[in-house]
Amino acid sequence: MEQPIISLRDVNTYYGESHILQSVSLDVFRGEVVSLLGRNGVGKTTTLQTILGVPSPRSGEIRFKGEIISGIKTSDIVRRGLGWVPQGHRIFPTLSVSENLTLAASRARPGSWTLPKIYDYFPRLQERRNARGDALSGGEQQMLAIARALVQNPDMFLMDEPSEGLSPRLVQEVGDLIKDLNRQGVSILLVEQNLHFALDMADRVLIMNKGAIVFQGKPEQIRTNPLLCGQLLGVSMGKEPRSGLVN
Amino acid sequence: MLEFLTVQSLNGLVYSMVLFLLALGLSLTFGLLRVVNLAHGAFFLMGAYFGTTVWGLTHSFWAAVVIAPLGAALMGGLLEKLWLQRFYVRDELDQVILTFGFALVFSDLMKVLWGKDIRGFPTPSAFSGAVEIANISFPSYRLLLILVGVALFVITWLAIERTRIGALIRASVADRVMVSGLGFDIRLLFTIVFAFGTGIAGLAGVLGAPIMGIYPGLDFEVLITTLIVVVVGGLGSIAGAFWASLLIGMAETFGKALVPEVASFIIFALMAGVLLIRAWGRDEEEVE
Ligand SMILES: Nc1ncnc2c1ncn2[C@@H]1O[C@H](COP(=O)(O)OP(=O)(O)O)[C@@H](O)[C@H]1O
Ligand SMILES: [Mg+2]
């Protein structure tokens, strides 16, 4: 079988005494988009951050492109080719748009995404080049967060609720962007609350509950399984799917 | 009367700029590392003593001005790398206690190495004269200090606001985890900034020595005043440190000249006043 680009094996993560991730195992294969779903507080963000070493897992093994990355420094993990789009954007508020991007670009791996190409692709960021991070709208901050990861030419994205707080039109834009990146061969582990969006994007879906992966399957399996939706995601899948949907 | 005002204002400016050099390092270090370095005053005194030693060896004021701050920066860099860095995972109280411990250790070491007597320090011959300003003659060395302070304010401000490394520092002040998440190892940056801050404190020590003298206990004296400046200016703000240095430096200078009995009380009162006004401002915001 094909080698996964990232794999977690029996990963346990603690915040102080609280045992958050409980023996989590998952794989993402090259070129795949995998959506990680689950109610608020089940450990989705912790899963992404554990991959990045903030914090490192207390036990278990994480491999990226075949090599063990659990236990090494965050900066070294990232430089092996991971792009982090964190929950809530985390744009540097006191840096301008161009400073945010230039900073990321100064630590980039070689690849096809350059600053000029980024500005071409995100004309809105070009227009707002000199605006401070904290002067941007939520949508602009989200675009910048994605652009900031993209300019580093990662082999894989870790995206944490990129559709959070966006208008339907912008959710659509982020969706197109994700599909576009995926077509270029980038793998994506996508954490989402927006069920419809997540199912649209995903080749495969994982559902978390209380710090453990409790379901793996195809998007269709979830669309047709009201029990899963109700119990694990806290949503009902009617004709008009709504939920943690933002719109 | 006018003469008195002019002289005291100039003296106040000189003292303010020495305070600013001290506050700059303390404030920058706090902004980035989130550690209040209570050993900061020790680096000031260390710079002054290093200066006397270099002067004793070379009889060159300028050699002292260059080498002494580098010595203080080296000691600061080592302190951060070998000790402080292990304490970032601990809580703030542990870190403060560690730096206070070093303040005491350095203080005693300096007594052992350089003795307990008050030492003087000569002004450089190029600046031993005086300059005519508004009918009074003012020592040119003191004017030099004012210029150095203003120049360092402008240079550091530009470096932080306009350069790549400045952007990295601002980013790390705002969100250091995100900075690591972009692939930067900020431990080196922490060491560099801490060394820079202690180096500038050392510079303040050696530059201030010809007018303030050098003696045991000066480290804690300047530490207290610098802490007040940094609290008034807002921790982490360079411009804040600059304006607060002017305020406190002027207040203390005029206080000593006009009402010497209560001079040291004045700056504490100022600090309390600023804190009160800030607290009121916050209360109003909350009410809105
Ligand atoms: N820094 C932290 N310190 C302590 N507990 C945390 C921290 N971050 C998250 N948690 C806890 O870990 C659990 C999982 O959180 P998180 O991974 O953010 O969930 P999700 O992203 O699925 O909403 C929650 O119970 C949360 O309260
Ligand atoms: Mg989350």
Image (cartoon, coloured by chain):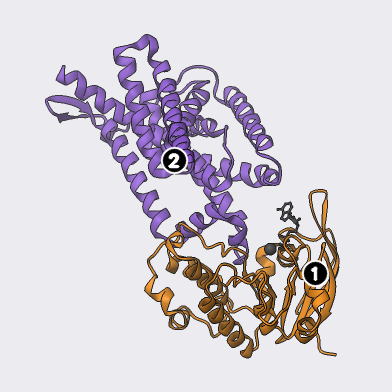
The percent position of residue A239, horizontal first and vertical second, equals 69, 82
Above or below — where is A118 with respect to B288? below
- Residue A55 as seen in the image, left or right of residue B115: right
Question: Chain coloured purple: which letter?
Answer: B
Which chain gets the orange colouring? Answer: A
Q: Tell me if residue B172 comes above or below residue B87 in the rendering.
A: below
Residue type, mark 1 in image: Leu
Image disc number at residue B202: none
For residue B128, which quarter of the picture? top left
Label 1 chain ID: A
| Image quarter of residue A82 | bottom right
Q: Which of the image's four quarters has the N terminus of chain B?
A: top left
A218 displayed left or right of B2: right
Total marks shown come to: 2
Mark whose residue sits in front, 2 or 1: 1
**Circle on res. B24:** 2
Which structural element holds mark 2?
A: helix
Image quadrant of ligand 2 equals bottom right
- Spot occupied by residue B156 in the image (x, y as percentages of width and height): 39, 49
